Amino acid sequence: MIGLDSYRKIVDHALPSCFEGIRPQALHDATMWYPEAGGKRLRPVMALLACEASGGSVEDALPVALAVELVHNFSLVHDDIMDHDATRRGRATVHTRWDEATAILAGDVLFARAFEVLARIPDPAAHQEASRLLSVAIRRLCEGQAMDVAFEKRKDVTTAEYLDMIGGKTAVLFAAACHGGALSAKRTNRAAIEALDRFGDAFGMAFQIADDLLDVTADSQTMGKPWGSDVRAGKQTVLVLEALARADAAQRRALDAALGNPKATDEEVRRAVDAMRASGALAAAEALRDRHAQAAADAIAPLAETPAKRALLSLNEWARTRSY
Amino acid sequence: MIGLDSYRKIVDHALPSCFEGIRPQALHDATMWYPEAGGKRLRPVMALLACEASGGSVEDALPVALAVELVHNFSLVHDDIMDHDATRRGRATVHTRWDEATAILAGDVLFARAFEVLARIPDPAAHQEASRLLSVAIRRLCEGQAMDVAFEKRKDVTTAEYLDMIGGKTAVLFAAACHGGALSAKRTNRAAIEALDRFGDAFGMAFQIADDLLDVTADSQTMGKPWGSDVRAGKQTVLVLEALARADAAQRRALDAALGNPKATDEEVRRAVDAMRASGALAAAEALRDRHAQAAADAIAPLAETPAKRALLSLNEWARTRSY
């Protein structure tokens, strides 16, 4: 994420305005809780870059950038309730810090504010396209989360179903950020808008697969959540699905001991990860991640060579190889 | 609600299209659960009438009408989780019939679909105004619900605070329905839009006060929820606040025995209601309701005499005197 600090600062500077006037105080504070805790601001930064990459200026894309960041935080607040997560970005989750009613409402207010902010787009036709885009993205995000929750109770999830799920849960909001950023440029360019939409979608797929891989390859300090927490929670990531499909009997035993076992020891999780590696599942998941990252790069190859395009490409490379 | 069946049928006919393509199946069914159970369709019918009353045709207002009905149902699904309600419209609530995760997501999808449907408004400028309007309304709705929840833990709520709360929780969506319906008319008329916004707001205030009164004056069969359930839940309605402010010692004891006591007998609730009546609180709440109903009628008095205006006025009179 080198070189993107100036973009992040633009987002950080504008974000507090999104929480003005929310009341009562507890609800106001709960809506700000995750956004003010930081985060990578990936989606808004990509909206700004997409706008520049299609000939616009960053200011044009600010409504879209802020709206997608608010939507991202809305989904985190609600997902954390459903997933019973206690910490996020090193802080207590909203429903833990306050209560569940406040967390449901804080998510709803973040959602509503996203559309309030989106209405700042000066051109009504651009606003209408962005609004349609974002509402579809949010609905698909919810559908992806519903699939993710449903997968927990199933033993027969396929890699294709998993990819369909993360297409909604993760990729669609990156696509909306890039698409919305591009259409915010004053002189819109249909080819660039469509290329950036495809870039965002493929980037999001690679990003999510990389995220799933990090659960077993990164250490907990840099991740901000415990190592192997997806494994213990029994999340059926592409890594797990591929491992279950490829494992021999011994590998299968190692996987079964840790997957979905909240009390699995670090040693048991380590043996399960060894089985993922030995069975070839890790390499298969990495290959899948890299294919999507390549598709992202290919999508914007036809765009003019600009600093913004180069920044998007290096962000794409970072997402593929990141360690946090 | 006599004479409005044709408007309700238009809404009922168009509503199923709002649920097309939602997946997985459980989430699809959960989003439809309340809308297909019926309800009065008050908000969408008022959007259609407001459009006609400002010179448009009902078809023009369909996107706004459907969107406000979806938003209303979104708020019911989420509120029922927070209020731990088990039944709604004679059915199990969504979080009871499915589970809480599904209910949170179903609400979110109803919210998202509202904005997807709103984007069907053909004129981008009208769409932008409707979108801004609806997003502010939803945020204020959430703020009102947060205040309502916060009031449960307080002993010093004033009637002014209560009115502020229902202004968000109830009135703002009626105002948005009428405002949005009016601006959907092909030849928009600023004076009519503003008059209808004020009508919706005042109507909503009267409607909510009437609803609070019905908790103690209606029987449970026609209400679809147990008699005195707000009393037992300790809801600080205007009726309760006025009663607490006016009660003598004996009346106060009768109130204290039933208010916020889930195990209060029907006889105890009856004695509390008698205290509300004897203290003058019932009459004060009725007067407040009638003042808002009058303000609603006054707001649209300057509009041309049309069947739609007459229908809005009779709806306003029904809301004031209704028994269900």
Image (spheres, coloured by chain):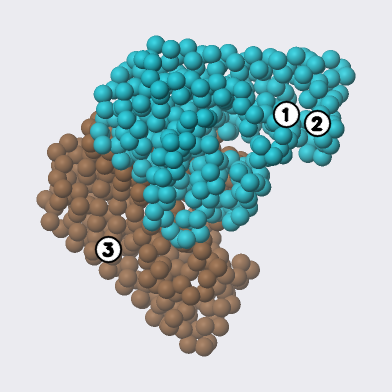
Chain colours: A cyan, B brown
Tell me residue B23's x, y (percent): 53, 28
The residue carrying pointer 2 sits among few (fewer than 14), some (14 to 19) or many (20 or more) residues within 10 Å by Cα, namely many
Label 1 to label 3, Cα distance in Å?
Answer: 62 Å
Q: Are marks 3 and 2 in contact (CB under 8 Å)?
A: no
Do the residues bearing badges 1 and 3 touch, measured as CB atoms within 8 Å? no
Whichever of labels 1 and 2 marks the residue nearer the N terminus, that label is: 1
Nearer the viewer's eye, disc 3 or disc 2? 2
Pointers 1 and 2 within a single chain: yes
* Secondary element type, mark 2: helix
Closer to the camera in the image, A85 or B56: A85
Q: Chain of mark 2?
A: A
Q: Is residue B24 visible?
A: no
Q: Which quadrant would the C terminus of chain A be assigned to in this image? A: top right
Examine the rendered structure and indicate whether residue A243 appears above or below residue A99: above
- In this rendering, would A103 be left or right of B247? right
Residue under pointer 3: B293
Instruction: Look at 34% across and 56% down and name the residue there.
Output: B171
- Secondary structure at badge 3 equals helix
| Residue placed under numbered mark 1 in the picture | A216
Residue type (three-letter) at the residue carrying disc 3:
Ala
Left or right for B314, reference A211:
left
Q: In the visual, does B282 lie left or right of A164? A: left
Residue that carries the numbered disc 2 in the rendered image: A269
Q: Nearer the viewer, mark 1 or mark 3?
A: 1
Residue at 67% in and 29% down: A214
Indicate the amino acid at tag 2. Val
**Is residue A316 at all visible to an observer of this figure?**
yes
Distance Cα–Cα, label 1 vs label 2: 8 Å
